[in-house]
Amino acid sequence: RQTGITGMGIHFGQNIRPSTLMDIGYALLSCDNLAEMIEFNRRYQQLTQQIATGHLEIGPKTSRLIWTPLHDDDAEYQRPITEGTMAGYALFGRWVTWDPDLQIEEIHMCHRKPDDMSVYEQAFPYKLVFEAEKNVVVAPTELFRKPLPQANPELVKILAARLDRSLEALSKPQTMAAQTFVCIQSILRDGTPTIIRVADTLSTPERTLTRRQHAEETKFRDIH
């Protein structure tokens, strides 16, 4: 609100890149179709955010991608997150289908219609419904089942195995090994995750990090 920028969430969503989501983002680009991509994202969503969940309802001709907040917050409070998510969905859809004119039919959002629609009309050249019951992307079912040109099942399998480890670490008490593993995942995109970089990121002296790992009967190279 203080920036005075209309559609701040939209600007954020339009700047999401696969690398923003790390392994999840690269796996999404390698799925067989949009339906598989949405299900994959739903499975690992808590690794990137714990604000809302997205799931797909498949219909005979039309399907609905529904974005549901996990907390009962006011729709206006959720506005930037909702708009960013919808913009991100549309952006990812264009990328993976290689279709600049993605066949989205409607976008529904729970918050009120803004006074200035210029940003929205540019970002969403589809029918927009405000004050809706749910946050929804409506599109033809065939769009979600259409084979994607860059599908790579083997890469998805490899990344899913790594993400399963991250989910397991997330559900367990935060041992030093678990903290180290999550930290490694977060800094991989910026270069080699050395023990010095991990220690700096965790604000822990390297010797203390090593000692605590030894106490848990593990070593940095095993986690790495």
Image (tube, rainbow, N blue to C red):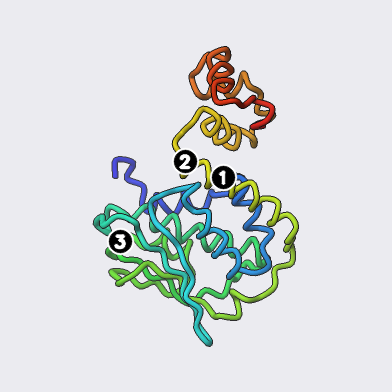
Cβ atoms under marks 1 and 2 closer than 8 Å: no
Classed neighbour count for the residue bearing mark 1: other residues with Cα under 10 Å, few (<14), some (14–19), many (≥20): few
Question: Which residue position holds label 2?
Answer: 172
Relative placement, left or right, of 89 versus 81 is right
Residue 216 locus on image (x, y percent): 55, 25
Instruction: Please identify the quadrant where the N terminus is shown.
Output: top left
The residues bearing labels 1 and 2 have C-alpha atoms spaced at a distance of 25 Å
Q: Earlier in the sequence, mark 3 or mark 2?
A: 3
Q: Amino acid at mark 3?
A: Pro
Could you tell me which secondary element the residue under label 1 belongs to?
A: helix
On screen, residue 88 above or below 210: below
Classed neighbour count for the residue bearing mark 3: other residues with Cα under 10 Å, few (<14), some (14–19), many (≥20): few
Q: Quadrant of residue 194?
A: top right
3 or 2: mark nearer the eye: 2
1 or 2: mark nearer the eye: 2
Instruction: Please identify the quadrant where the C terminus is shown.
Output: top right
**Nearest to the observer: residue 118 or residue 153:** 153
The residues bearing labels 3 and 1 have C-alpha atoms spaced at a distance of 28 Å
The residues bearing labels 3 and 2 have C-alpha atoms spaced at a distance of 43 Å
Could you tell me which secondary element the residue under label 3 belongs to?
A: loop
On screen, residue 122 above or below 60: above
Q: Amino acid at mark 1?
A: Thr
Residue 88 locus on image (x, y percent): 51, 57
Question: Which residue position holds label 1?
Answer: 20
Relative placement, left or right, of 150 versus 117 is right
Question: Which residue position holds label 3?
Answer: 114
Cβ atoms under marks 3 and 2 closer than 8 Å: no
Residue 182 locus on image (x, y percent): 55, 36
**Nearest to the observer: residue 189 or residue 120:** 189
Q: Earlier in the sequence, mark 1 or mark 2?
A: 1
**Which residue lies at the image location 48% right of the left edge and 19% below the top edge?**
203
Q: Quadrant of residue 76?
A: bottom left
